[in-house]
Image: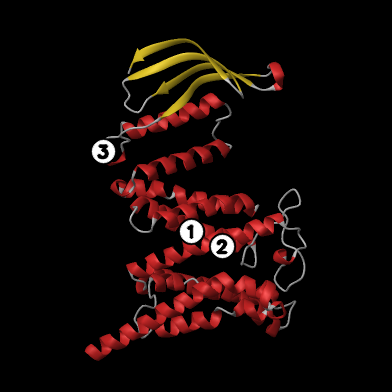
Amino acid sequence: MNKIDNSEERAQAIVRRLIWFYFWLLIIEGALRKWIMPGWSNPLLLVRDPVLIAIYFFAIPAKVFPRNGWTWILLVIGFLSLLISFVHLWMYLPPTTIALVTGYGFRSNYLHLPLIFVMAKVLRPEDVKRFGWWTLMVLVPIVILMVLQFRAAPDAFVNRTAGGEGEMMMSAMGKVRTAATFSFVTGVVAYFALATGFLVWALLRRTVYNNWLLAAAGTALVIGIVVSGSRSVVGACAVVVASLAVVLFLRADSVNRFGQTLLAVVVLGLLRRSPRVDLGSVSDAILAALRFQYALAHSPDKACQLKSRVGIHLGQVTEWDEAFGGHPKLVGLAAARGDRGAHRLTVRVRATRWHATAVRPVWLDA
């Protein structure tokens, strides 16, 4: 029995090392194809496949290869796709060509997916923490490279595509969609989503990583989103943060005040851009934020309640179309509330973009 257990543990240790190798290849694969070995760009598309096959090979004796329903569903869908491709293309292409094309499609769409379940079984908590540490640490140099790509000309060396020729996809104002060390911007989308997940987890737990790492990674994440030139990067990070809503529903005690505030910001941002919700005015947006805070503060679930808040909130306002100096002018009612909440100051304000004048201040009991 001990021999069996030892053989399984050794196989699991090999799988973990191979997963780390797969992780680093995923990050540097684009750099190899664009700058280091551009002549081998096409073969390098498959550079991770031998590592993946080795993972599956050792996962079987390690008893961590997935045998769940999801794996069988992937297998059935994959082979049905192969069969349908052969049926549709049989009259137009030789069988060998069909086999190569559909085989590569099967590899791209299905072969790597079972690795998700292998990682869930074989990785220990300390392994996940190490993956997160390196993900956040590597994010900083990746964003530095993205800034250089953003500032460089589209035909510059840092903006080469896979194979060393051509230019990256363009964004706006003559800027490229920065891809960092990845072959395409889709790599940045996936990596930023991963980094956002680890960053949010660390901020919720507070003791997972050092504050200097969180500050550096958080700053890099914001800068990277700005220079990425891709809405998909913004959307991927927003989806990760919005998943806190599910966590808040299932385990409210695991989301601290920071998580609640972050979730509120993302939800309001999504609502602001949604065609189904009208937050076209400043007043509507502020009222939505205040109502969201009120709902959290008066929630029957004590774990969700906001204990205190600090800030100045602008209430009912109207924007005039014309103003002196050509700047938009706001007129309306504003309310400021201190942290201790003893009183509420209500004033009528007249504001431009550059200054605000308060008229008739009135102190009201909270």
Give the number of the disc on residue 302: 3
Total marks drawn? 3
Task: Give above or below for 233 relative to 350.
Answer: below
Disc 3 residue type (three-letter) = Lys
Give the structural element (helix, strand or loop) at label 3. Answer: helix
Estimate how packed mark 3 is, as few (under 14), some (14 to 19) or many (20 or more) residues with alpha carbons within 10 Å: few
x%, y% of residue 153? 76, 58
Residue shown at the point (63%, 54%) measured from the top left: 228
Disc 2 residue type (three-letter) = Pro
Disc 1 residue type (three-letter) = Ala
Q: Classify residue 163 by image quadrant.
A: bottom right
Disc 1: which residue? 195
Q: CA separation, marks 1 and 3? A: 30 Å
Residue 177 appears anywhere in the view: no
Q: Nearer the viewer, residue 77 or 211?
A: 211
Q: CA separation, marks 3 and 2? A: 41 Å
Disc 2: which residue? 141
